[in-house]
Image: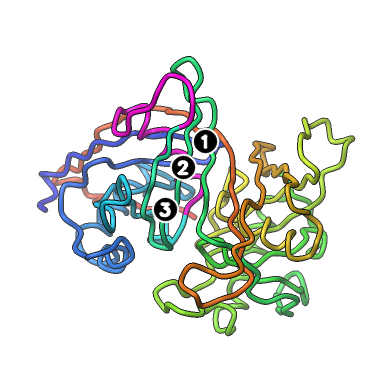
Amino acid sequence: MKAAAWEIQTTDYHTAGEPFRIVPSPPFTIPGETVLERRENAMLGDANKLRRLLVNEPRGHADMYGGFIVPPNDSGAHFGVLFWHKDGFSTACGHGTIALGTWAVRSGLVRAPDDGDTEVVIDVPSGRVTARVSMSAGHVEKVTFQNVPSYVVERDIEVKTADFGRLRVDVLWGGALYASLPAQAAGLDVTPSNLHKLITAGRQVKAALANHPAAHHPTDTRLDGMYGTIFHEPVGPDSGLVLTGALAQRNVTIFADGQVDRSPCGSGTAARVAALADSGELADGDVLDHFSIIDSHFTAQVVDHSGEVSDGGVTGGVVVEVTGRAFPVGEGKFTLEADDELGLGFVLR
């Protein structure tokens, strides 16, 4: 594509405060037989240039997130998606799945009754997920996405950080690999006032695990790599928040290279539920109230103790459903003039 020809239509949503910029019709074909293959090919060429254009300043920002709509793996799904952020293409995105379920119904791509549930089936790089869109009087009331099986990869790994000493983390899979630890272990609370320290700690934990065996997916090297660090803390009945489940926690996920999830992180929530179920802290049928650093809210629970991951590579996986809401925030047409000296843009962080 010549730069002068770039005119990109987008629809922007937020899920619990976290942005999701949808590109319904990318202006080129991203090759591959599956969404996972397309993710590999998207890292090169025009798709990566378009990602940079839409996420970089002045059209985006360091914490922008989005997705390209692509064909599904087969006729069993409505569509596929390539998730992207400041630093590349991710293997999973729960908040994006909630946004896509809402968008698919609101746009008419998937027909839904005025009342009742409609399933939007989406192929993502880590597998096939389903967004169950609940309608009431013609409006989207909530979306519940069923994730790929989630599980504990390894517990109690010691990592050494420059600023926070030696920390012990669990590595979890929820469609991407996460390091998980109590925020207090790093001497922090999950509050906006600690944001810069949380970013620093998240980056250092991720870097310390870069070459650890737990950073490798057990069956597919294309899914390798620590995606983010989840800092969590308990939420008590005196928090002033509305609690509906058996257990309540707050978390912040620092992912990619220092990006901050404003939502409770959908795939990260699934990973945390798998860990809590594994430890016995979240019993069968119990619901987790999961809050973000801005106190936006998801609920989640185990719906199936499948006993194995779908690819057969790991035992002990659980199927988790995460419920939240997404809202449109605008539509846009992004352009790049041939003589724009900033080109694909920049980021300051």
Q: Position of residue 198 (x, y in %)?
A: 68, 57
Location of residue 86 (image quadrant): bottom left
Q: Magenta region: which residues?
A: 93-117
- Residue at screen point 31% across, 51% down: 76
Expressed as whole percent of the image width and height from the top left, the position of residue 325 reads 54, 33
Q: Position of residue 315 (x, y in %)?
A: 60, 74
Which residue is identified by label 1? 143
Q: Marks 2 and 3: in contact by CB < 8 Å? A: no
Q: Quadrant of residue 31?
A: bottom left
Q: Earlier in the sequence, mark 1 or mark 2?
A: 2
The residue under label 3 is which amino acid type? Val
Q: What's the amino acid at mark 1? A: Val
* SS type, badge 3: loop
- Using residue 243 as the reference point, say whether residue 1 is left or right of it: left
Disc 3 or disc 2, which is closer to the eye?
Answer: 2
Query: Circle 1: is it few (<14), some (14-19), or many (20+) Cα within 10 Å?
Result: many
**Residue identified by numbered label 3:** 347
Within-10-Å neighbours for mark 2: few <14, some 14–19, many 20+: many
The vertical placement of 348 against 168, above or below, is above
Q: Which mark is residue 131?
A: 2
Labels 1 & 2 near each other (Cβ < 8 A)? yes
